[in-house]
Amino acid sequence: MNYPKFYETIQSIKVRDPLSAALGAFENGEYEFNYIDAVKLAGHSCPTIAGAYIITLEGLKALYPDELVVRGNIKVQFQEDLEDGVAGVISNVISQLTGATDKSGFKGLQGKFSRHSLMHFNSDIESSVRFTRLDTAKSVDVTYNPSSVLPNPDIQVLMQKMALGEASSNELKEFGVLWQDRVKRIFENLNEVVFVEEI
């Protein structure tokens, strides 16, 4: 499996999942996600997928500064509607990482480990996403904006040639390299693209 090597430098998200522990999937319910997992889920890597991962990574670091993230113990709220813009794409990644779903998730065992109804849209918030711990009610707002990390200007030209079916194999390859270069630079400039505020 070949992919851009910078994927391996991105911080992983370590979790403790009580449902996983109860069902014997992972010892103590402990496992981790990395950016490659998010890319596999989406089938691609772009500023939106990077943003979904960054939003979750930074939000959970603020919610669980000194302990493992408890997957399934997190409510997620979006300002946008599910069908607005890329909210659905972002929510899929966040659902993978946190376990939270709207109505489609796990219903629980004997009243425990429920994952459904933990993700909400059209929420009255001012950020991209709000994460709330169910056990402590601590919340953090996370805002993501990658506009300060500009794409290479050649991307637009190459994209037009691709749309017209005029791009050569070398140009197609160059497009992918330049596209991932922007994703890489987004991860390298987290202080410019993401803001986390405790509520």
Image: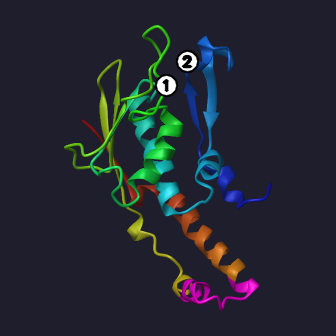
Does residue 134 appear to the left or right of 122 in the view shown?
right
Q: Amino acid at mark 2?
A: Leu
Task: Tell me the number on the disc at residue 141.
Answer: none
| Residue located beneath label 1 in the image | 106
98 vs 147: above or below: above
Q: Secondary structure at mark 1?
A: loop
Quadrant hosting residue 114: top left
Does residue 90 appear to the left or right of 158 in the view shown?
left
Residue 176 location (% of width, % of height): 65, 73
In this orientation, which residue lies closer to the viewer: 29 or 19? 19
The boundaries of the magenta stretch are 157-171
Q: Amino acid at mark 1?
A: Phe
| Residue located beneath label 2 in the image | 19
Do tag 2 and tag 1 residues touch (Cβ < 8 Å)?
A: yes
In space, the residues marked 2 and 1 are separated at their CA atoms by: 10 Å
Which quadrant is the C terminus positioned in? top left
